[in-house]
Image (tube, rainbow, N blue to C red):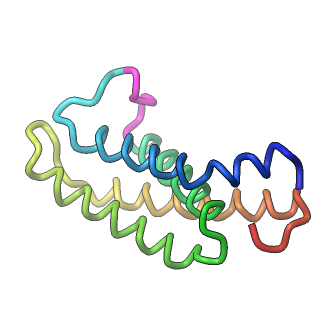
């Protein structure tokens, strides 16, 4: 395992928590900052949940199933809460984008495992 990957794994719990906080804030504020928008709403969901999955998998190895289920439930909760936020609406397509992002994060984890030669990242 490379020193950079070792450092990333050590920081993963804190990075996961910061990312979760940022995603929660951006998802539930009435009008997200323009700079936080990637230009296509589904890309925002896809990339955020991919990053959360990758960081969570590095932070808590061997718990990818629980993490994926928990993140998908979190995505559903965000959609429900957005119905109460002015200017926001719940969309099934957002939840689908969250799920695809989770799959991307799990795929990236497999790539990292192969590159690092580690069996359980």
- Give the x, y percent position of residue 81: 17, 55
Q: Quadrant of the C terminus?
A: bottom right
Q: Quadrant of residue 104?
A: bottom right
In magenta stretch: residue 38: yes
At 31% from the left and 47% from the top, the residue drawn is 24
Q: Which residues are magenta?
A: 35-41
* Of the pair 98 and 71, the residue shown nearer to us: 71
Q: Looking at the rendering, in which quadrant would you find the N terminus?
A: bottom right
Answer with left or right where residue 44 lies relative to residue 24: right
Could you tell me which residue is drawn at 56 percent across and 50 percent down? 51
Q: Residue furthest top?
A: 35
Q: Residue at x 26, y 56 (%)?
A: 78
Res 44 quadrant in image: top left
Image location (x, y in percent) of residue 14: 53, 49
- Magenta stretch holds residue 27: no
Figure check: 20 above or below 103: above
Judging depth in this view, the residue of 14 and 91 nearest the camera is 14
Residue 89 in percent (x, y) is at 17, 48
Q: Is residue 61 above or below residue 14?
A: below
């Amino acid at each position: 395992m490379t020193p950079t990957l070792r450092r990333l794994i050590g920081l993963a719990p804190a990075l996961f928590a910061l990312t979760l906080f940022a995603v929660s804030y951006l998802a539930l504020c009435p009008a997200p900052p323009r700079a936080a928008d990637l230009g296509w709403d589904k890309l925002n969901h896809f990339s955020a949940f991919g990053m959360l999955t990758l960081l969570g998998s590095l932070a808590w190895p061997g718990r990818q199933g629980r993490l994926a289920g928990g993140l998908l439930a979190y995505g559903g909760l965000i959609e429900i809460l957005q119905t109460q936020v002015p200017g926001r609406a719940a969309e099934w397509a957002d939840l689908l984008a969250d799920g695809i992002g989770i799959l991307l994060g799990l795929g990236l984890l497999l790539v990292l495992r192969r590159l690092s030669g580690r069996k359980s990242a």
